[in-house]
Image: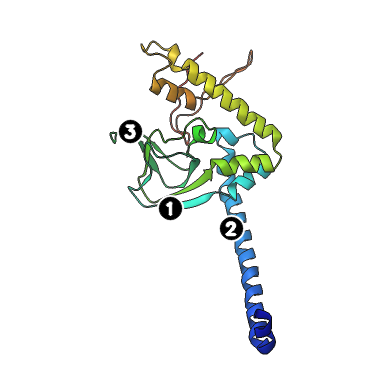
């Protein structure tokens, strides 16, 4: 039917073909511009996140080009405690507050802060706290399954092994309740709050004679407390 219509109305057919070609070209240019913008704005933020710090630029660019961008008005909840967690959320513009289930503010975070590392590692499937925008805020969201597929399909074997090593390390920390179980808090490693801290804690190994430099208190993820284990 389409072929017959084109034969009967060739001018109309030519116009539609031209329209289709022009639209396809515009879509291609728009996609290229979006990819370039995401690489320019999101890749540097990813490179500063501990989980991705040693990823090659090729993989960082792939992740950046596949984020979901969202804008959240002031006082909007980006996610709530108990929500299903299948992504990492990165603050690209604005500011957010992390709140407990009772609404108490735990901390305030700005551009470059990220939430959901444990979800990316497959260690948590729910949000442990509520995140609320204190002003108009833009976020970039990386889906966990999509990220894992890109790492596998892109043949990034070293990065896949590094993630698996980190995943197992965090599981061990959670089982032992480290680092909080080292403190005199009269708790046990089975305590849910102790496990939550363990899952999110970063283990640092300082070689002999090396100088350990504490992380700054004004970093994108807020103040950091260290425990000598």
Q: Position of residue 147 (x, y in %)?
A: 59, 42
The residue carrying pointer 2 sits among few (fewer than 14), some (14 to 19) or many (20 or more) residues within 10 Å by Cα, namely few
Identify whether 121 is placed above or below 212.
below
Please tell me which residue lies in front, 174 or 111: 174
Question: Which mark is first along the chain, 2 or 3?
Answer: 2
The numbered mark at residue 34 is 2
Q: Quadrant of the N terminus?
A: bottom right
Q: Residue at x 43, y 35 (%)?
A: 126
Q: Earlier in the sequence, mark 1 or mark 2?
A: 2
Nearer the camera: disc 3 or disc 2:
3
The CA distance from mark 3 to mark 1 is 23 Å
Q: Which residue is mark 3?
A: 100
Q: Is residue 95 above or below residue 166?
A: below
Element type where label 3 sits in the image:
loop
For label 1, the crowd category at 10 Å Cα-Cα, with few meaning under 14, some 14 to 19 and many 20 or more, is: some
Q: Is residue 90 above or below residue 15?
A: above
Q: How is the image coloured?
A: rainbow
Provide residue 205's location: percent of width, then percent of height.
59, 18
* Residue 57 appears in the figure: no
- View extreme (left): residue: 102
| Disc 1 and disc 2 in contact, CB within 8 angstroms | no
């Amino acid at each position: 039917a389409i072929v017959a219509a084109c034969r009967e109305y060739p001018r109309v057919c030519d116009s539609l073909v031209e329209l289709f070609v022009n639209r396809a070209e515009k879509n291609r240019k728009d996609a290229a511009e979006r990819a370039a913008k995401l690489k320019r704005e999101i890749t540097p933020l990813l490179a500063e996140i501990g989980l991705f710090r040693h990823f090659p630029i090729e993989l960082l660019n792939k992740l950046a080009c596949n984020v979901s961008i969202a804008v959240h008005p002031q006082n909007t909840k980006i996610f709530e405690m108990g929500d299903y967690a299948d992504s990492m959320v990165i603050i690209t513009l604005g500011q957010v507050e992390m709140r407990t289930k009772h609404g108490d503010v735990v901390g305030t975070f700005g551009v470059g802060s990220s939430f959901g590392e444990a979800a990316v590692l497959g260690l948590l499937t729910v949000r442990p706290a509520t995140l609320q925008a204190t002003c108009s805020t833009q976020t970039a969201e990386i889906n966990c399954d999509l990220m894992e597929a890109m790492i596998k399909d892109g043949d990034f074997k070293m990065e896949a092994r590094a993630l698996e090593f980190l995943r197992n390390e965090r599981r061990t920390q959670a089982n032992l309740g480290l680092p909080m179980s080292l403190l005199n808090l009269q708790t046990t490693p089975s305590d849910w709050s102790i496990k939550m801290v363990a899952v999110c804690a970063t283990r640092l190994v300082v070689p002999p004679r090396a100088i350990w430099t504490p992380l700054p208190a004004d970093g994108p993820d807020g103040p950091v407390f260290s425990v000598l284990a």
